[in-house]
Each structure stands twice: as C-alpha cells, then as structure tokens.
C-alpha cells in the first residue's frame, strides 16, 4: 500500500489521469446499463428487421440520407423527433426501431427521445453507417426530393 501512496505523491498529474480514466470507464458502464435503449451490432439489427419487422431510422442530414442509406430506412431529423413530430414513424411504435447515424454517437440522444415518445423497443446501431459500410452491406440512393 505504501508503494501506491508513494506513486500518487510523486506523480500527481499521472495519478489524476488514472483516476479520470477509471471514473470515465465506470460512468460509461453505468450509462450503458441504465440506458433506455440497446446498442446492437449489424447482425442483430438485420435479424430485427427481417424477423420482427424492425425499422431503421436514419437521423443524418437530408443530403447525407439522399447520398446513401440503408434500404427501407425511414428518414427523420433529430430535431423532429425531439419535438415529437414523428410522421410515418408513428406507425411503428411497437416495432423494433434501430436508430442509425454516421458513427453511432449522436443516435443515443435520439434513441432516448424516441423512448420518451412512447417507443418500447429502441436500439442504436453500433458504430452507425461506418460499420455498415465496413461490412460491405448495400446502401441505396434517393431519387428526387423526399
């Protein structure tokens, strides 16, 4: 124990970095366990869509969506979901919802908003469309205005 005390007193900056990392890891684990959504991989997402009539919800900008999106996905901006302006998404309240963004990070807030709006089975695609592209899965382009 004395060695730890000596280390902490001789290296205060490094000690603070270690404490910060431990707190960040614990905070991340707690957030993941208490989240109202699940983070799922590509395989699980495709099973939800194919077997349980799940719906991909793409929350990227309209231009990004038009350039390429997952086939059959619905487009909704995070601001629309936050304001509960759900449109066609309203029909799928009891279906599994898979929220998709570019990296999987911004989808988490939108997933919480969907849960607050009454959606019961909300998921986030881990690593978003980056993972989808890395798996060489197809994207479709929108034709015309949507």
Image (spheres, helix red, strand yellow):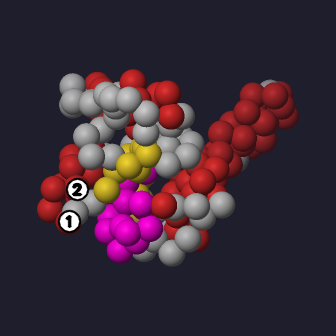
Count up the numbered dots. Answer: 2
**Picture layout, residue 44 above or below residue 113:** above
User: Which class describes the residues within 10 Å of circle 1: few (<14), some (14-19), or many (20+)?
Assistant: few
Residue at left 83%, top 31%?
A: 12
Residue at left 65%, top 60%?
A: 83
Left/right placement of residue 71 relative to residue 144 reads left
Q: Disc 2 designates what residue?
A: 49
Confirm whether the magenta stretch covers residue 19: no
Chain part drawn in magenta: 88-99
User: Which class describes the residues within 10 Å of circle 2: few (<14), some (14-19), or many (20+)?
Assistant: some
Left/right placement of residue 128 relative to residue 111 reads left
Residue at left 58%, top 61%?
A: 85
**Picture layout, residue 76 above or below residue 128:** below
**Picture layout, residue 25 above or below residue 95:** above
- Give the SS element for disc 2: helix
The answer to whether mark 2 and mark 1 are in CB contact below 8 A is yes
Q: Is residue 104 visible?
A: no
Residue 63, position as x, y percentages in the image: 49, 27
Task: Give the alpha-carbon distance from disc 2 to disc 1, as whole Å.
Answer: 6 Å
Residue 90: quarter of image: bottom left
Q: Which residue is farthest front?
A: 144
Q: Disc 1 designates what residue?
A: 52
- Give the SS element for disc 1: helix
Q: Is residue 78 visible?
A: yes
Residue 31, position as x, y percentages in the image: 58, 58
In the drawing, what numbered circle is on residue 24?
none
Depth check: 41 or 119 in front?
119
Residue at left 44%, top 46%?
A: 75
Q: Which residue is farthest left?
A: 51
Residue 140, position as x, y percentages in the image: 27, 30
């Amino acid at each position: 124990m004395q060695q730890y005390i000596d280390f902490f007193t001789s290296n205060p900056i490094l000690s603070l970095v270690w404490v910060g990392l431990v707190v960040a890891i614990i905070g991340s684990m707690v957030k993941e366990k208490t989240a109202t959504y699940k983070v799922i991989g590509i395989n699980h997402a495709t099973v939800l869509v194919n077997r349980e009539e799940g719906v991909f919800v793409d929350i990227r900008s309209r231009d990004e969506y038009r350039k390429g999106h997952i086939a059959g996905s619905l487009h909704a901006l995070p601001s629309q979901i936050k304001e509960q302006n759900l449109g066609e998404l309203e029909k799928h309240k009891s279906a599994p919802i898979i929220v998709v963004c570019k990296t999987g990070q911004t989808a988490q807030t939108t997933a919480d908003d969907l849960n607050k709006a009454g959606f019961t089975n909300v998921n986030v695609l881990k690593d978003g469309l980056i993972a989808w592209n890395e798996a060489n899965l197809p994207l479709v382009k929108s034709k015309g205005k949507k």
